[in-house]
Image (cartoon, helix red, strand yellow):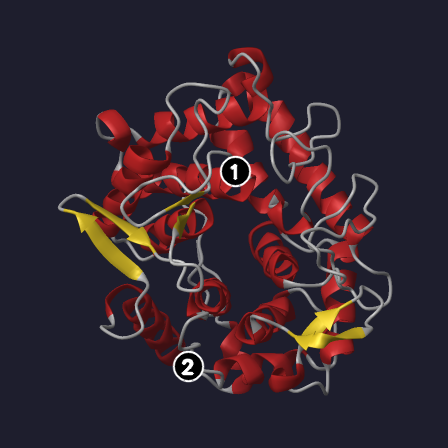
């Protein structure tokens, strides 16, 4: 599996790109001031959401994906141990799911799951099995990944009062299991293509259909002029405003461009999705990072700055993988010259920064 160094288009060598990936990983996990990984027990650790001082399935599963991509089984196993020990539900209607937010000592802040965590957990586990082989117990990575996906698809059949994370009819991932709407940034067709190879055999056709449904949904929910995607959306793609936010393009939504880029990298061009990120790059061209705001999908800026401007810069850089914009190389250069975020809100920005850097350096690989 060999992927190009996209930064070569702006004169960055393969060696320099790989070195920046390693440096960024080291900062996230080991830098005394800027890391947001921490050991918890002798055999477990967590990724800290520095803005909220908790551990979330989003960050935990992101950390596991980072660790498997960087061949760090020690860190992977510590994160997975924490997730299974402190977040996993062994009974009740959420049996087989993970509490989406816990305190750093493992006490639950919430009981319900967030499906983006489950899909990243499963994908990271399958990749761990490929890189390092299956062990016993929670280190039987393949079976652990299959169990997660089994619950995601069949919870309503397996657990009394349970709801699946993917809608059985349209194959869309739900915002949370109980809801009949979605989050476009949760849609990871490139993961579902791999689930169709690794999940329980009877569910493999479901995941193949989910991959195509998600590609169509991402295009459906994006604005036809700006390319912006809503944070939350109805099944028909229309934005759903939630949590007292009067704007649609905000933090979750930034990940859509990153997801389109990785889908393109692993499974080839999708014309409709390339149009989405081309329009997005065209819209943001000329707007400096310090002026990134909260937006309506038509591009109207609200009187509120983006909470995660470095994340926007990162995903616009990654979008160059799939974009046809004349400005694609300019976005690569902007991202390359942007440092990691520091301070209280660094967790989310720097997670997206790492994944975008990894794919642009040609180092984000589908280990299966």
Q: Position of residue 295 (x, y in %)?
A: 75, 69
Residue 13 tag number: 2
Q: The C terminus is located in which quarter?
A: top left
Q: Is residue 161 above or below residue 20?
A: above
Is disc 2 surrounded by few (<14), some (14 to 19) or many (20+) residues within 10 Å? some
Does dot 2 land on a helix, a strand or a loop?
Answer: loop
Residue at the image point whose x is 37% and y is 70% from the top = 21
Q: Which secondary structure, mark 1?
A: helix
Q: Nearer the viewer, residue 278 or 2?
A: 278
Judge by depth and name the residue closer to the eye, 14 or 139. 139
Along the line of sight, the residue nearer the viewer: 58 or 145: 58
Q: Nearer the viewer, residue 23 or 301?
A: 301
- Residue 245 percent location from the top left of the image: 71, 59
Work out whether mark 2 precedes mark 1 in sequence or the reverse, and give the earlier one: 2
Q: From the top left corner, tell me how far across and down residue 281 is, in percent.
A: 72, 74
Q: Mark 1 points at which residue?
A: 194
Q: In this view, does 122 lie to the left or right of 269?
A: left
Evaluate if marks 2 and 1 touch, with contact meaning CB atoms under 8 Å apart.
no
* Residue at 51% across, 14% down: 159
What is the distance, in whole Å, between disc 2 and disc 1 at their CAs? Answer: 30 Å
**Quadrant of res 18:** bottom left
- Indicate whether 209 appears above or below 302: above
The percent coordinates of residue 214 (x first, y second) are 70, 42
Count of numbered tags: 2
């Amino acid at each position: 599996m060999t992927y190009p160094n996209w930064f070569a288009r702006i004169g960055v060598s393969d060696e320099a790109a790989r070195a920046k990936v390693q440096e960024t990983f080291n900062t996230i996990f080991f830098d005394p001031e800027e890391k947001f990984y921490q050991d918890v027990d002798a055999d477990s650790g967590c990724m800290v959401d520095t803005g909220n001082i908790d551990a979330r399935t989003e960050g935990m599963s992101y950390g596991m994906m980072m660790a498997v991509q960087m061949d760090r089984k020690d860190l992977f196993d510590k994160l997975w141990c924490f997730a299974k020990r402190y977040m996993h539900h062994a009974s009740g209607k959420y049996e087989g799911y993970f509490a989406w937010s816990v305190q750093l000592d493992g006490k639950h802040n919430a009981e319900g799951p967030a499906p983006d965590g489950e899909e990243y957990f499963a994908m990271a586990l399958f990749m761990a099995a490929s890189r390092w082989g299956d062990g016993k117990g929670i280190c039987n990575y393949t079976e652990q990944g299959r169990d997660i996906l089994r619950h995601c698809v069949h919870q309503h059949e397996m657990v009394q009062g349970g709801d699946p994370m993917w809608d059985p009819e349209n194959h869309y991932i739900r915002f949370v299991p109980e809801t009949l709407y979605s989050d476009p940034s949760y849609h990871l067709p490139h993961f579902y293509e791999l689930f169709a190879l690794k999940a329980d055999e009877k569910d493999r056709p479901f995941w193949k259909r989910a991959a195509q449904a998600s590609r169509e949904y991402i295009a459906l929910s994006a604005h036809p002029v700006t390319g912006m995607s809503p944070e939350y959306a109805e099944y028909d793609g229309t934005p759903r405003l939630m949590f007292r936010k009067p704007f649609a393009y905000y933090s979750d939504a930034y990940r859509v461009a990153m997801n389109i880029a990785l889908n393109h990298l692993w499974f080839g061009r999708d014309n409709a999705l390339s149009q989405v990120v081309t329009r997005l790059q065209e819209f943001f061209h000329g707007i400096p990072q310090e002026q990134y705001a909260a937006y309506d999908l038509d591009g109207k800026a609200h009187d509120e700055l983006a909470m995660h401007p470095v994340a926007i810069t990162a995903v616009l850089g990654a979008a160059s993988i799939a974009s046809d914009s004349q400005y694609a190389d300019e976005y690569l250069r902007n991202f390359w010259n942007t440092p990691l975020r520091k301070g209280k809100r660094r967790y989310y920005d720097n997670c997206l920064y790492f994944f975008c850097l990894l794919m642009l350096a040609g180092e984000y690989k589908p280990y299966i």
